[in-house]
Image (cartoon, helix red, strand yellow):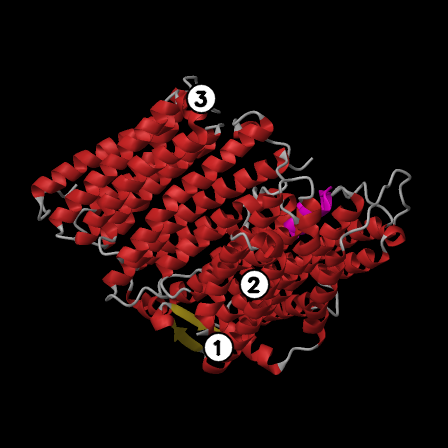
Amino acid sequence: MELAAIVLLPAAAGALCWSPFGRRFAAPITFASAVIVLALALSASMQAARLGHFDAAGGWLTCDGLGALIVVLVALVGTTAAVFSWGYIRLRSRHAAPSKEQHYYVLYNLFLMSLFAVPLLANVALMWVAVELTTLLSAFLVGFEDTPEALEAAWKYVVLTTLGAVLALLGFLILYWGSRVAGEPPFTWLGLVGAAPRMPPSLLWPAFLFILVGFGVKVGLVPMHTWLPDAHSQAPASICALLSGVETTTVLYVILRLFPVVGGAAALDARPWFIGFGLLSVAIATLLLVYVQDFKRMFAFSTVEHMGIILVAAGLGGAEAHLAAAYQMTGHAIAKSFCFLAAGTLTATFGTQEIAAVRGIVKYAPFSALAFVTGAFAIAGAPPFAIFISEFMILKAGIDGGHYLVIGLLAFFLVIAFCSILFHVTRMTFGAPRADTATSVAPVSCGIALAVAAIPLVVIGVYLPSMFQGLLRAAAAAMGG
Amino acid sequence: MGMNSSPFPIISALDALTGSLFLLTALGVLATRQVLASLQFFIAQSLLLTLSAALLGVALNSPHLLAVAAITIATKTILIPWVLRRTVSAEVYRTREIERVLNIPTSLLVAALLVVLAYVIANPVLAAVNAPFAQVNLPLGIAAMLLGVFTVAIRREAVPQLLGLLAVENGVFFAGVAIVPDLPVIAELAAAVDVPVVALVVGLLTRRIHLRVGTTAVGMLSSLRER
């Protein structure tokens, strides 16, 4: 029951925003829908943590620990970004036709619907369609600002991620073929894990590679990441929070689902591919972080880095590493969306995204400065935030498993990325103010959104409710650890 | 290609002929100088995909594949050209040369290598599993798919890139009709609806880029990069 409502409520909210009613009330409708869906998501996740796995809507929808974790993260970021949008989107569309703001909320709700559909749809072929919808429904949100740069970013986003999705489609068709050969199990993740030992490895292997590379485009794995910093820096900050915080994670979720499937075939080993793509992404993103000149691009590169870290953790294998991967996904979604909301508040205040043009934030906007520094520490992995703990867990799991080279390289890049982010952020926050700085006051909703988003950011680092620990363990179990 | 061992000799021969023409149209989408010709090659390619799906549907007695044939002809030869005419008709119907990164002979040389690569990818799969028409459809579908990716990479303008993207999709479905003739209809329908939506979104985006930037040479848009 909850599962169907989680997918259908955003669709209904989108339709309501589209109606004449939405001309005035699109923002409150979106907010109300997001809050209700968040409550439903929390209730579904408790059920998933307790039961391990349950179906709904006649078997069309399904939910286990990993799926529930993604749903909760999408619902959480969907709520804070909706609060942020309230004033921010009105500010950004004040010179445009009134319908522009209304269209934003229609697409915002439909985009959320597609993000919920990916982890909840039971049929893997339909799940592919949902992933494809996430791109198509967010294309005009990425191009919302209507500047040449924003349209360029939207173009690259749609063409490259759709190209990747079609390559992944061939992978899913081959996977379906393999499951027919293995005795026609239902085409669900559970069915595939069960059938994997009977599937011919020569089918399972190309299917895995096509999906890894094809959906790797959308996750932003190096070398398929080129579109990501453009889209994740040109979209409005509320959309960046969704793209970077949860859209990447939602597609990475699909790749993680393949881990137990491929692991079921004795002849195959996906781990070197996970670790290889993961380390490469971490390494290149770290280099780009050193030289970055735009603070929204900085957080975008950090997303590439974090996707790499999670993939390495998944590739290390074992219950400890997979628990760390689930925790890292949680920490990243919460911290990265917070960082983009803080960055959006700064662009509204200073009117620029250039790192060099923003100095002495603490003097002009002390509250934004506090949020920006907090977000930067959280995403860079400083204690007492969750990412510090999850990265520590990953390093420990790797050392316990004897992966000294992998862990050495990972730790090396993590330290450089940490220093780069904090170097840029402290210069911006505490540097001597420039003479030519002109500021305006950011909308109130930006401050409210940051205050609300700060609660989970701070809490999950110091205290994990036992119910949430259960959810993380269930998620790790679904990854095959 | 093991055609003698096939239980459907005539239909296999027809399918092989369809497959070769299918690959030729993929080369057409890749190498023509005019946008309209590129679109016509795409429509021809979609018709050949329809034909292959119908042939296999008859041979395997599969209503699924006949549904795929009907969906393909409706979406790709009618709906997509209509969508493009509505959104970017000036781009498609104005006769002029398309800008490209590589010249045509070099492109065709790379295309030949990609076809070889497609067989390298498909052979181990075909050696392990026996499916009646996969011997023809899988390697040629993968080849058309790779040619489509290459088209997106070397075209610098919006509509030709979109046609490359749609050709990739055709390639995947050309392989798909042989390897999964019994994919649930709902999945086929959803995937089929996806394609015109891609065309619509990309077409609308192209129109907006044209209005805002004054060109659709998307390859020339490069203000976003690391300095």
Marks 1 and 3, how far apart at CA: 54 Å
Q: Nearer the viewer, mark 2 or mark 3?
A: 2
In front here: B102 or B72? B72
Magenta segment includes A292: yes
Residue A31 locus on image (x, y percent): 61, 62
Magenta-highlighted residues:
A288-303
Decide: is B168 above or below A45. above
Please tell me which of labels 2 and 1 falls first in the chain: 1
Q: Is residue B83 magenta?
A: no
Mark 3, Cα crowd under 10 Å, few <14 / some 14-19 / many 20+, is some
What residue type is disc 1 on? Ala
Helix or strand or loop: what does disc 2 sit on?
Answer: helix
Task: From the top left corner, tell me how far across and down residue A55 is, in percent.
Answer: 39, 74
Task: From the top left corner, tell me how far across and down residue A343 is, in percent.
Answer: 73, 51
Q: Is residue A194 positioned above or below B42 on the image?
A: below
Residue, disc 3: B98
Label 2, label 3: how far apart the Cα atoms are: 42 Å
